[in-house]
Image (cartoon, helix red, strand yellow):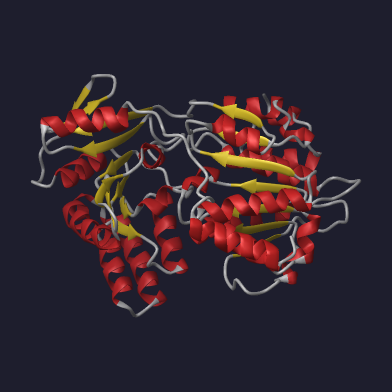
Amino acid sequence: MKVKDLNLPASIIQFYLDSGITGLYPPQDEAIDSGLLENKNIMAAIPTASGKTLLAEFAMLKSILDDKKPGKALYIVPLRALASEKYDRFRSFESIMKSSGRPVSTGIATGDFDSRDDWLGQFDIIVATSEKVDSLLRNRSRWMEEITVVVADEVHLIDSPGRGPTLEIVLAKLRQINPNMQMIALSATIGNADEIAKWLDAALVVSEWRPIILKEGVFFGNAINFSDLSQREVKERSRDATISLVVDTLAEGGQCLIFESSRKNTEGMAQRAGTAISSLISGEIKDKLKIVADEVRETSEVDTARKLALCIENGSAFHHAGLISEQRKLVEGGFRNGIIKVISATPTLSAGLNLPARRVIIKGYRRYDASFGLTPIPVLEYKQMAGRAGRPRLDPYGESVLIAKTYDELEELTQQYVLAKAENIWSKLGSENALRTHILSTIATGF
């Protein structure tokens, strides 16, 4: 399907044509056929980089530019970092003019959970975390009754014991405020997407299609063993398998994402990777890295900024929740521009941030749990991280790699992750603490 043939105002179509987007991916075609542009609720469970956000943009912009009854859109995200990324993206819509002659405007709300923030009502698109939306609902922000489109990004996080109950109750309350609002739920591929679609009265769009081939495998014995039984030999350049994989990636002209289990581990990994790849980076790129490193130093005088700057000078970086916004943007910008070659990150980076790489190395597949000690991560989380592999239009393919120390572990990781399907997700609202909190809130606010 061609963008020029969509049932959208001419100014929206021209915006995307000017952006170089002329055609749709198969999952996007399916969403259009399912009623996305006819105000139908949509539950899209499709892989990373398959164009989920574009579906949301179409629905939001069509409602905002409706001549008869201009709408307002709310875009809900799980993380502040993701809110900033979407805010920066949606600000580009300022070149699209409404019938009033004013540009499409975007606001962002992630902080202060005790205010009504009526000033947000002036914007056409509001980007916010689910916790902030919960606060706005409790504080009875008047502009929320004007919302015509709600987008729930990473809706599979309803399964999260921490964030899930708030996201679930927020979506339920928003639908009660305006039963006619359009709901767009965006999710990774999950086992029971049909149940989420039924809950939201939404048409279901499920697809495994990706714009670039993803090869999943496990590294063992100086080779990556892929799910199709093929192998790729990797020259041993270090006793640390991760370093060998990183250097191999750069030798092929690619970039690398490494997922670690903790902030401390991400920083240590970035330092080691930087030391290993520094000699492989050209003088021209090192000059650019020096500029970025100096900008990082100017953001803060704390030790984290100093460590990060030293890594960046060598072509690596770390990315975790301890970084301030300016530091995150410098790291993400350097990676997108191709000068930072390696990012070592905590799994939060897998939740929607648009930072694809040729090879994704999932180093820490166990996580510490206060009740159970080290426990394996869910398949869904693994698939989210693996899905970051492959840069559309830049890479011929993407690779995700787990690391095994023994043959038995190779077999175990292949069966439990590489060949496995993502689990079903379940409501976590039934836990006593979550239920008590949200029932009291609902009563107190007279919902």
- For image coordinates 25% across by 38% down, the residue present is 402
- For image coordinates 28% across by 23% down, the residue present is 227
From this viewpoint, which residue is outermost toward the right? 68
Compared to residue 6, the image places residue 71 above or below, namely below
Residue 5 visible in rendering: yes
Residue 395 percent across, percent down from the top left: 39, 34
Residue 184 percent across, percent down from the top left: 66, 41
What is the quadrant of residue 111 in the picture?
bottom right
In the drawing, does residue 370 fall left or right of residue 134?
A: left
Residue 185 percent across, percent down from the top left: 61, 41
Compared to residue 38, the image places residue 129 above or below, namely below
In the drawing, does residue 79 fall left or right of residue 149?
A: left
- For image coordinates 42% across by 62% down, the residue present is 328
In the rendered image, the quadrant that contains the N terminus is: top right
Residue 233 visible in rendering: no
In the depicted view, which residue is nearer to us: 236 or 171? 171
- For image coordinates 78% across by 49% down, the residue present is 148
From this viewpoint, which residue is outermost toward the bottom? 301
From this viewpoint, which residue is outermost toward the top? 229
In the drawing, does residue 94 fall left or right of residue 415?
A: right
Looking at the rendered structure, the number of numbered marks drawn on it comes to 0
In the depicted view, which residue is nearer to us: 336 or 59? 59
Residue 372 percent across, percent down from the top left: 26, 52
